[in-house]
Image (tube, coloured by chain):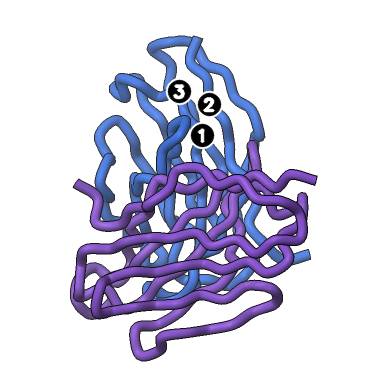
Chain colours: A blue, B purple
Amino acid sequence: DGGITQSPKYLFRKEGQNVTLSCEQNLNHDAMYWYRQDPGQGLRLIYYSQIVNDFQKGDIAEGYSVSREKKESFPLTVTSAQKNPTAFYLCASSASGLDTQYFGPGTRLTVL
Amino acid sequence: GESVGLHLPTLSVQEGDNSIINCAYSNSASDYFIWYKQESGKGPQFIIDIRSNMDKRQGQRVTVLLNKTVKHLSLQIAATQPGDSAVYFCAENMGSGGSNYKLTFGKGTLLTVNP
């Protein structure tokens, strides 16, 4: 069963704690992305990675960090420096930068 | 501001009618456009895409039209069904004109299909 998986589906954290969101794909895609979605809003790009061991900041990278040690995995850490972390986080992948991005099911993060 | 936007934030149609969702873009360098469907609490689902060397592309019950002269994109859904109820996003990629990896998304249009 091919696709993109994100875990967990729901995540709760206390203020001041770092939390890591998982994203895995078995599509053999080179590029992976993290987006943030707030209610009634479009998607905003946090980070993206074109290939393994390489990643670039998107439009709203402050307070987030990523790694790309394996082609299949692109975890996102939401740090305590992120001032408003409660949101729906979406991971996507594409074969290359000019190809269609396919999305995972998302993780809803709530900071208590 | 955003280079991709929507004319209508909400659209309500009767089951069986055709739906048209519109999107305006401002960047003439954009050369790849995608429509996504997002149901509540789920990730966006790819519907159809179109490159700037085309003005029309058809899929199953869906058609995307691209008018580069007025920088306008539309998604037409034929014989709309209750299962089509969702938020629809258009997205553009500037391709060789900018970062190949960056999609710019509009805010979305909520489509409601009444039985």
Query: Dot 3 lies on which element?
Result: loop
Q: What residue is rendered at 47% in x and 29% in y?
A: A87
Q: Is residue B100 above or below residue B37?
A: below
Comparing B45 with A29, the one in front is: B45
Whether tag 3 and tag 2 are in contact, CB under 8 A, the answer is yes
On the same chain, marks 3 and 2? The answer is yes
Is B75 left, or right, of B45 in this rendering?
Answer: left
**Chain of the residue where label 3 is placed in the rendered structure:** A
Marks 2 & 1, CB-CB < 8 Å contact:
yes
Q: Quadrant of residue A79?
A: top left
Q: Which mark is residue A88?
A: 1
Amino acid type, residue under disc 3 in the picture: Thr
Task: Give the alpha-carbon distance from disc 3 to disc 2, as whole Å.
Answer: 5 Å
Q: Is residue A72 visible?
A: no
Query: Which residue does the numbered mark 3 point to in the structure image?
Result: A86
- Image coords of residue B39 (percent x, y): 65, 45
Do circles 3 and 1 both sit on a common chain?
A: yes
Q: Which residue is mark 2?
A: A109
- Label 1: chain letter: A
